Amino acid sequence: MAGSHLYIIQSRVTGAVKIGRSDDPDRRLRQLQTGCPYTLRTILVVDGGGRHERRVHHAMERHRTRHTAGGEWFAETGLGDIPLDVWDHVHPWYQEDPDWWRRK
């Protein structure tokens, strides 16, 4: 998926996060919301960062939620395990606030 974006979508109720890639993260949010009983929100989009998806999944493996074995949903506590070089593509104000995903 050349040119795809890395996204993190979060459940406002459970705090669980979905890590994925899409050419249109807003559309992907709408698709996921259709099948989810909780309100979802996009907390991060790394433009052109879709190539990092597998590495982020691997880094966050121990935080994968039990009910999605093999899936792309993780406990929010795993966000700190995102590889440092991926953070190079994230806006600086995210990097300066350790609780950025709770504030958006």
Image (cartoon, grey):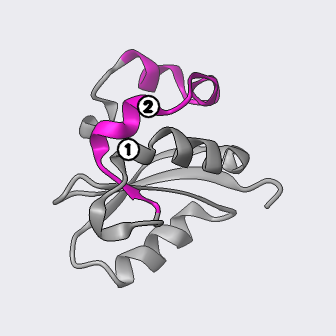
The correct choice, above or below, for 82 with respect to 37 in the image is above
Magenta stretch, residue numbers: 72-96
Residue extending farthest to the top is 96
Instruction: Count residues near mark 1 (Cα–Cα under 10 Å), then give few for <14, some for 14-19, many for 20+.
Output: few
Q: Residue 74, can we see it?
A: yes
Tag 2 residue:
81
Residue 16 position in % (x across, y down): 28, 55
Mark 2 element type = helix
Contact, mark 2 vs mark 1 (Cβ under 8 Å): yes
At x 16%, y 60%, the residue is 13
Q: Residue 89 vs residue 45: left or right?
A: right
* Magenta-drawn stretch contains 51: no
Q: Residue 15 vs residue 80: left or right?
A: left
Q: Residue 67 vs residue 59: left or right?
A: left
Residue extending farthest to the bottom is 35
The correct choice, above or below, for 16 with respect to 26 in the image is above
Q: In terms of image quadrants, where is residue 4?
A: bottom right
Type of amino acid under label 2: Asp
